Image: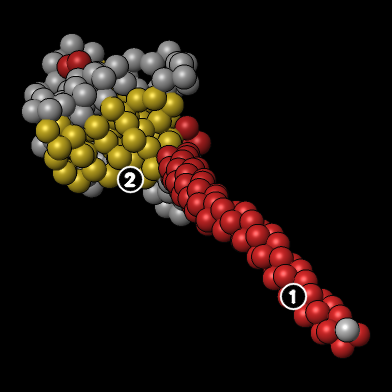
Amino acid sequence: MARSYKQNYDEEYVEDFLTDEDDGVEILDDIYVDEDDDYDDDYAKKPEQAKHKNLGRAIAKEILSYIKILVIAALIALIITRFIIINAQVPTGSMESTININDRLIGFRLSYLFSEPQRGDIIIFKFPDNEKDNYVKRVIGTPGDVVVISGGKVYVNEVELSEDYIKEPMVDNGTTQTFLVPEDCYFVMGDNRNSSFDSRYWQTTHFVHKDKILAKVIFKYFNGLTKKPTFNTFK
């Protein structure tokens, strides 16, 4: 009996042990599976979140790069127009037929940085009677010149100018005007002599001081008559 009891006990113990062990494995498996499910969900979500985050960063970076380009371009344009060129549109016909109404011009601000304006140059300058306005005229007299206008002709230092650029002969009003151009100053006239408010008629002074010259006109890029782009250079 003792042997039989012991055998039965051992068999029950082993059976119970195995059952408990199996139960333990099953429980652990359940826990493992549950944790795996949660981990898989999180793992699946993280790449999507990362993608959205990276996409947002990429878009922000792209926008920022465009903003930087625009800012840099604006600064460059400001520097160029402030210190290097003038982009001008002519509202009157005082320089016809060389420059017509609504023609658009480019003037170079640095033209006279190391040189002086020459007779025949077309310049953009501050109008002496009202410096808020900018005018475009042709240089006729340079410092020290004596300019005489008489009989519909222009004489510089007693030599008649040959002016193939004027629109039409100047009307003779029966008077003679004489101007001695001061140092660092210039006498200017429009190519449309009969319809140009220029050095002949100003009140404050008859001359443009060099400091008031903004630029030398170098070319025309838009024709106000044809309303088309063009390219005409000037002396």
Q: Residue at the right extreme? A: 2
**Up-down relation of residue 150 to residue 231 (above or below):** above
Q: Residues within 10 Å of mark 2 (few under 14, many from 20)?
A: some
- Please tell me which residue is depicted at 8% across the width and 28% down the height of the picture: 226
What residue would you read off at disc 1? 15
- Crowding at mark 1 (Cα within 10 Å: few <14, some 14-19, many 20+): few
Is residue 119 visible from the viewing direction of this image?
no
Report the front residue among 104 and 22: 22
Q: Nearer the viewer, residue 116 or 69?
A: 69
- Please identify the quarter of the rendering in which residue 140 is found: top left
Residue 118 numbered tag = 2
Q: Please report the residue visible at 43 percent of the width from the left and 13 percent of the height from the top.
A: 203
Q: Is residue 6 left or right of residue 107?
A: right
Q: Residue at x 79, y 75 (%)?
A: 12
Residue furthest to the bottom: 3
Q: Is residue 179 above or below residue 106?
A: above
Q: Position of residue 212 (x, y in %)?
A: 47, 32
Q: How many marks?
A: 2
The image position of residue 138, as x and y in percent, is 28, 33
Image position of 24 (left or right of 223): right
Disc sitting over residue 76 in the figure = none
Q: Residue at x 12, y 28 (%)?
A: 227
Q: Name the element at disc 2.
A: loop
**Dividing the picture into quarters, in which one does residue 89 lie?**
top left
Mark 2: which amino acid?
A: Gln
List x then y, in percent, for residue 113.
Answer: 47, 50
Q: Amino acid at mark 1?
A: Glu
Q: Is residue 121 visible?
A: yes
Q: CA distance from mark 2 to mark 1?
A: 119 Å
